[in-house]
Image: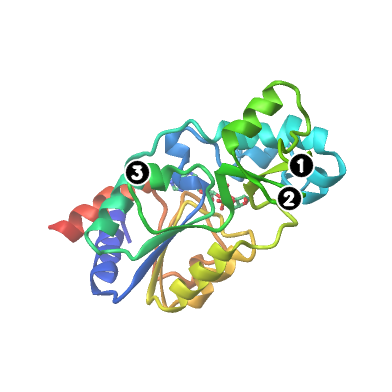
Amino acid sequence: MDSKNLFKKAAELIKSSQKTMVLTGAGISTESGIPDFRSPGTGLWENMDPTEVLSTKVLFNSPEEFYRVGFKILSSMRNAEPNEAHYILSEMEKEGIIAGVITQNIDNLHQKAGSKKVYEVHGNTREGSCLRCGEKVSFELLEEKVAKEEIPPRCDRCGGMLRPDVVLFGDPMPHAFDLALKEVQESDLLIVIGSSLVVAPVNFLPGMVDGLIIINATETPYDYKADVVIREKASYALRNIWNLIKS
Ligand code: APR
């Protein structure tokens, strides 16, 4: 089926759905200049093992390495701007077409584009916290301390080590994941945009809903289950689908 028909089928499914949730991954932010993790050739994990770089093992056992390598990756995601795909999702929420966005991304671009209901199931790069007393700090403070070579960065209140509020490999899932799970269980349609769907437990979500639309540049393990699989760039696909829904 050519893309035009796929867009039409997706638009029809979205219009007839009682409740639609969206699940996004790094692929929705590549058009904002943030590399994803697993795209062949450009993915961040091409030449480093994520479980080594952004894991609690490296944070706790060799914090110096964590703050010299992993932390830089987190920092690099913070100064990007939303692209058309983020803005269309924000419009869809305002028009009541989607109930909210579940994102694996920590780049804050859905919120910058105006989305209100955003479940950050892999944490965020807005804040950090002290491992000893739990004090909340801004991500900027972490960046300032690391820039001044205070590695690992220490809590000004109790001297404990500070960490970013990103979900690292080895961390338990945040409460946002429980809320996202409930939303998906109450939905009849999930639109996946820009995710390879290889990381658990987020990749369980597409298996929990009847209707499934996947917009992704490459194959995913859930393509067999999807009603519609669209092999296009996120912004191009969403622009076409949104125009059909509005027309
Ligand atoms: N439009 C559509 N799809 C795209 C685009 C685009 N413009 N750019 C990239 N993609 C697709 C890629 O083909 C890839 O399949 O997006 C997918 C991104 O997959 P990953 O890089 O694996 O990112 P993601 O699924 O978000 O990773 C999940 O892994 O490392 C952890 O915690 C990290 O949240 C991340 C998790």
Above/below status of 204 relative to 142: below
Above/below status of 193 relative to 39: below
Nearest to N terminus: mark 1 or mark 3: 3
Kind of element beneath mark 2: loop
The residue under label 2 is 133
Residue at 49% across, 67% down: 180
Nearest to N terminus: mark 2 or mark 1: 2
- Amino acid on which the number 1 mark rests in the picture: Cys
Mark closer to the observer (3, 2): 2
The residue under label 1 is 158
Choose between 88 and 5: the one closer to the eye: 88
Residue 105 appears at what percent x and percent y? 52, 48
Above/below status of 237 relative to 147: below
- Amino acid on which the number 3 mark rests in the picture: Ala
In the rendered image, the residue lying farthest to the left is 247
- Amino acid on which the number 2 mark rests in the picture: Cys
Mark closer to the observer (1, 3): 1
Q: CA distance from mark 2 to mark 1?
A: 7 Å
Kind of element beneath mark 1: loop
The residue under label 3 is 113
Nearest to N terminus: mark 3 or mark 2: 3
Circles 3, 2 touching at the beta carbon (< 8 Å): no
Q: Is residue 237 left or right of residue 180?
A: left
